[in-house]
């Protein structure tokens, strides 16, 4: 989608620190990290949010999120995967993205 920020990152039109890419997903560092590890996992295909994702796409992105945490060394200590969806959750970019956060104790419940 032409005016979508994360489509721009997936197409390498918008600069980002990409840590992994394959045919289906891109994993890149969040611009404003909230933990020692804070990456975003996006599908290359434009999907506005988790609410619009089919099972296969949601599974692909979830598996990539777990792999990103494992590859960064956080399998044992743990991590959090978050998909803010819609206004009350504070979704600010309308392209599906899973946050992967790790490297500090993560409070619960979230704000
Ligand atoms: P959300 O608020 O859940 O929609 O998350 C959007 C995330 O995208 C925020 O954590 C932002 O810091 C992050 N973000 C926005 N623009 C960029 C960018 N150009 N590169 C990397 N991360 C970004
Ligand atoms: Zn997009």
Image (tube, rainbow, N blue to C red):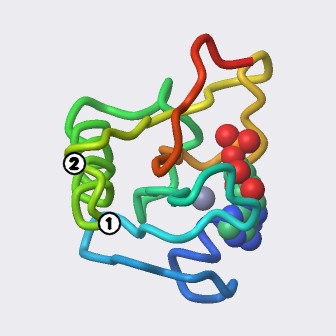
As drawn, which residue projects farthest toward the top? 109
Front in this rendered view, residue 32 or 42: 32
Which residue is denoted by mark 1 in the rendering?
72
Q: Which residue is mark 2?
A: 75
Nearest the eye: 99 or 12: 99
The residue depicted at 51 percent of the width and 75 percent of the height is 10
**Mark 1 closeness class: few <14, some 14–19, many ≥20 residues within 10 Å:** few
The picture places residue 54, in percent across and down from the top left corner, at 31, 32
Between the C-alphas of marks 2 and 1, the distance is 8 Å
* Figure quadrant of the C terminus: top right
The answer to whether 36 is drawn above or below residue 50 in the figure is below
The spot of residue 102 in percent (x, y) is 46, 48
Q: Is mark 1 within 8 Å of ligand 1?
A: no
Question: Disc 2, disc 1: CB below 8 Å?
Answer: no
Q: Residue at x 24, y 74 (%)?
A: 23
In the structure shown, which secondary structural element does the residue marked by tag 1 occupy?
Answer: loop
Image quadrant assignment for residue 55 = top left
* Quadrant position of the N terminus in the picture: bottom right
Q: How many marks?
A: 2
**From the viewer's perspective, is residue 2 above or below residue 69?**
below
In what element is the residue under mark 2?
loop
Residue occupying image coordinates x 48% and y 44%:
98
* Picture residue at 33% right of the left edge, 50% below the top: 65
Q: Nearer the viewer, residue 1 or 101?
A: 101
Residue 32 seen in this snapshot: yes
Using the rendered image of the protein, determine whether residue 4 is visible from the camera's viewpoint: no
């Amino acid at each position: 989608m032409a005016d979508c920020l994360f489509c721009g990152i997936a197409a390498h039109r918008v600069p980002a620190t990409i840590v992994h890419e394959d045919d289906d997903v891109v994993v890149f560092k969040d611009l404003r990290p909230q933990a020692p590890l804070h990456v975003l996992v996006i599908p290359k295909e434009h999907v506005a949010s988790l609410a619009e994702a089919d099972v296969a796409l949601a599974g692909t992105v979830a598996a990539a999120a777990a792999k990103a945490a494992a590859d960064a060394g956080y399998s044992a200590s743990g991590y959090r995967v978050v998909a803010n969806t819609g206004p009350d959750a504070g979704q600010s970019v309308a392209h599906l993205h899973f946050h992967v956060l790790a490297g500090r104790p993560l409070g619960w419940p979230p704000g």
